[in-house]
Image (cartoon, rainbow, N blue to C red):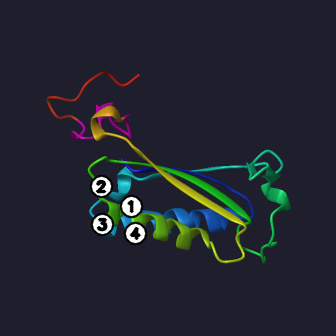
């Protein structure tokens, strides 16, 4: 269940949708069920994020239209994913978000998340993400 939380500035709703689709397509090409991909965008106040003691709002260069000035991403992926997968995903995320040399600050961090520790319900019963919905070993009722 890859989950990405993206805090950024300067992306319109259509660009966020396109980025989420691009990331999901990359993941599906690498063996992930697209319905298990979660991409969450959060607003960011660039006066509250500091790099080297400076607010990112003050960092040059100023971006062109459609280029994010600041992007911070946390990716939760299975600890079984290797470095090549992570490097490819990092590049895919940067590309999908339109990160260029005009982006003042881009940060992406991977955090391991065992599928056995993720529960979900998507138009069906609550189950662990490493087990199909309705499987005998699925746990817990849907609230």
In contact (CB < 8 Å): disc 4 and disc 1: yes
In contact (CB < 8 Å): disc 3 and disc 4: yes
Q: Residue at x 48, y 70 (%)?
A: 91
Mark 4: which secondary structure? helix
Residue under label 2, please give it.
81
Q: CA distance from mark 1 to mark 2?
A: 7 Å
Pinpoint residue 119: horizontal percent, then vertical percent: 35, 33
**Where 85 falls versus 122 (above or below)?**
below
Label 2 or label 4, whichever comes before in sequence order: 2
Extent of the magenta region: 119-133
Pinpoint residue 139: horizontal percent, then vertical percent: 25, 25
Mark 2: which secondary structure? loop
Depth check, mark 3 against mark 1: the one in front is 1
Label 1, residues with CA under 10 Å away: few <14, some 14-19, many ≥20:
some
Residue under label 4, please give it.
88
Q: CA distance from mark 2 to mark 4?
A: 11 Å
Depth check, mark 3 against mark 2: the one in front is 2
Residue under label 1, please give it.
86
Q: Residue furthest front?
A: 52
Residue under label 3, please give it.
30
Q: Nearer the viewer, residue 45 or 35?
A: 45
Q: Nearer the viewer, residue 140 or 11?
A: 11
Pinpoint residue 82: horizontal percent, then vertical percent: 29, 58
């Amino acid at each position: 269940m890859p989950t990405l939380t993206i805090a950024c500035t300067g992306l319109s709703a259509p660009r966020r949708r396109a980025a989420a689709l691009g990331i999901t397509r990359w993941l599906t090409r690498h063996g992930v069920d697209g319905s298990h991909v979660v991409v969450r965008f959060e607003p960011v106040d660039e006066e509250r994020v500091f790099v080297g003691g400076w607010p990112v709002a003050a960092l040059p260069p100023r971006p062109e239209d459609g280029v994010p000035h600041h992007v911070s991403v946390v990716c939760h992926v299975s600890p079984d994913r290797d470095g090549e997968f992570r490097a490819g995903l990092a590049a895919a995320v940067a590309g999908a978000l339109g990160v260029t040399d005009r982006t003042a600050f881009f940060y992406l961090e991977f955090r391991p998340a065992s599928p056995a520790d993720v529960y979900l319900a998507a138009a069906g019963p609550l189950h662990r993400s490493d087990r199909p919905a309705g499987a005998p070993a699925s746990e817990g009722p849907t609230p």
